[in-house]
Image: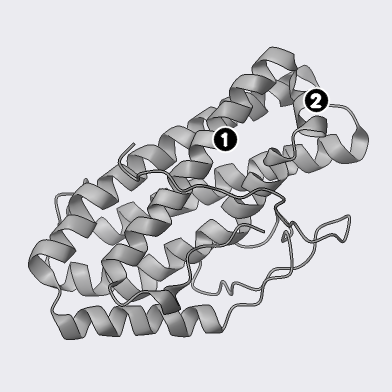
Amino acid sequence: MIHLPDPNKYNDPIRYFRECHALIITLINQLEQLTQEAEKKGVKQSIKEDRGWRDILDFLVNVAPIHEMDEEEALFPLIFEKVPHVGFQQPSSPIRFIEEQHTAMQQHSIELLKIWRQTIAKDEISDDEANKFILGAKELAAIYREHIRRENEIIYTTANDELLSPQERQNIIEKIREMHGKEVISGMFDYEAPVFSDPSYKPTYVAGADNEDAVSDEEFEVEDEDE
């Protein structure tokens, strides 16, 4: 499994969040590369041969929601209490707007995982499913890029340059550490699990259908988050 950076190694929460984004962008770049390759050689063949699908989908479904929860629970309430609008669309409800994007990214990821699993299990995929898989991967990558750009340029910059006191920074990173200490991760969770922005969601994941943990055989060099 590909993990987020360890929050225990950070004292500044904004730096931590930015490095989480850098990792996510690295994986989104790889998702786009896989999608291009799948268009060339066929979705079924790509799913069967390219281990990257498993690693990236595992991350997007299992691990990325932890980052979103960190933002929603530790950072956003403080930011929006101080600056309710922060330049986002739907200025009357910025938290809802951002969390809706979080939910959309999660739903897209779950849908890709569903098609991936069905293809592995049945060793076949229809033309409609293959097209849906390709289009879904492209749309997911686009949503992630725009979402991360907005958060980096507006929320993180505003929080870092104007809003957070040293004590507030300390409180945020401590809350993130506490949240991560409560997580239980054992593999790909069922794609029918509730989306992470649901208040009842708990980040406890169970093994996938093949009962194997999704462990990455690759090492990732994190790219610059602005790329």
Q: Which residue is mark 1?
A: 31
Residue 174, compared with residue 122, is above or below; it is below
- Give residue 49's quadrant in the image: top right
Q: Is residue 227 visible?
A: yes
Q: Is residue 101 left or right of residue 186?
A: left
**Measured from the top left, where is residue 65 in percent x and y?**
52, 60
Q: Would you call the spot at circle 1 few (<14 residues within 10 Å), some (14-19), or many (20 or more)?
A: many
**Measured from the top left, where is residue 82 in percent x and y?**
12, 71
Q: Looking at the image, which is closer to me, 147 or 126?
A: 147
Q: Is residue 30 left or right of residue 192?
A: left
Q: Amino acid at mark 1?
A: Leu
Q: Looking at the image, which is closer to me, 8 or 135?
A: 8
Q: Looking at the image, which is closer to me, 103 or 92?
A: 103
Q: Is residue 59 left or right of residue 91?
A: right
Q: Looking at the image, which is closer to me, 171 or 92?
A: 171
Residue at position x 84%, y 59% in the image: 212
Residue at position x 52%, y 28% in the image: 138
Query: Under tag 1, what secondary structure?
Result: helix
Q: Would you call the spot at circle 2 few (<14 residues within 10 Å), some (14-19), or many (20 or more)?
A: some
Q: Amino acid at mark 2?
A: Lys
**Measured from the top left, where is residue 5 in percent x and y?**
47, 65
Query: Under tag 2, what secondary structure?
Result: helix
Residue 114, compared with residue 199, is above or below; it is above
Q: How many angstroms separate mark 2 from mark 1 (CA)?
A: 16 Å
Q: Which residue is mark 2?
A: 44
Residue at position x 85%, y 38% in the image: 120
| Residue that protrudes farthest toward the right in the picture | 122
Q: Nearer the viewer, mark 2 or mark 1?
A: 1
| Residue that protrudes farthest toward the left in the picture | 162
